[in-house]
Image (cartoon, rainbow, N blue to C red):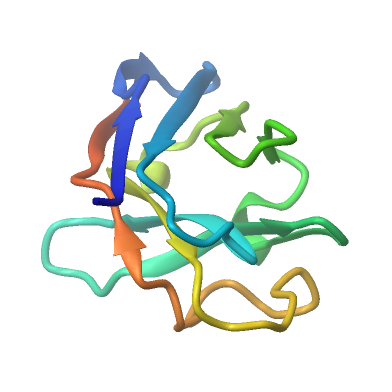
Amino acid sequence: AEQLVESGGGLVQAGGSLRLSCAASGYTNSPYCLGWFRQAPGKEREGVALIDTAGETYLDSVKGRFTISMENDKNRLYLQMNSLKPEDTATYYCAVDTVHTTWCSSAYPQHYTGMNYWGKGTLVTISS
């Protein structure tokens, strides 16, 4: 019933920008937390940014370069990525938490767990 679909990935040169979008549908419960995660080949998945109604939190390596935002109805999630680096190359996933009742914006996103719905991902490739 729940579906998340990412878009906006692609190939961009280092220093460039991309804006990722995530369209959500089929919620039975409104999400408490929404976020973006990424996984590079041969590496573990890591949280990039999280957002709830209280605020946002970011992975240290993207702080100041990436901005997460959402529509008021929580059916659209965005990740604005500026000053991109080759190290940002990965498949990016959006995810939501509709189960937990606490906010995530005070947590560090890198190893955050608790998301119960995931998109299929969109590939971001940064050339040097």
Residue 92, picture quadrant: top left
Q: Residue at x 35, y 44 (%)?
A: 26
Q: Residue at x 67, y 82 (%)?
A: 101
Q: Residue at x 21, y 70 (%)?
A: 43
Where is 19 relative to 52, above or below?
A: above
Q: Position of residue 120 (x, y in %)?
A: 18, 46
- Residue at the far left: name it: 42
Where is 89 relative to 63, above or below?
A: above
Q: Position of residue 38 (x, y in %)?
A: 35, 55
Residue 45 or 50: which is nearer the viewer? 50
Q: Residue at x 30, y 57 (%)?
A: 118
Task: Judge left or right: residue 112 versus residue 41.
Answer: right
Task: Judge left or right: residue 106 versus residue 10.
Answer: right
Residue 123, picture quadrant: top left
| Residue 5 seen | yes
Where is 69 relative to 98, above or below?
A: above
| Quadrant of the snapshot with the C terminus | top left
Where is 28 relative to 102, above or below?
A: above
Residue 48 or 94: which is nearer the viewer? 94
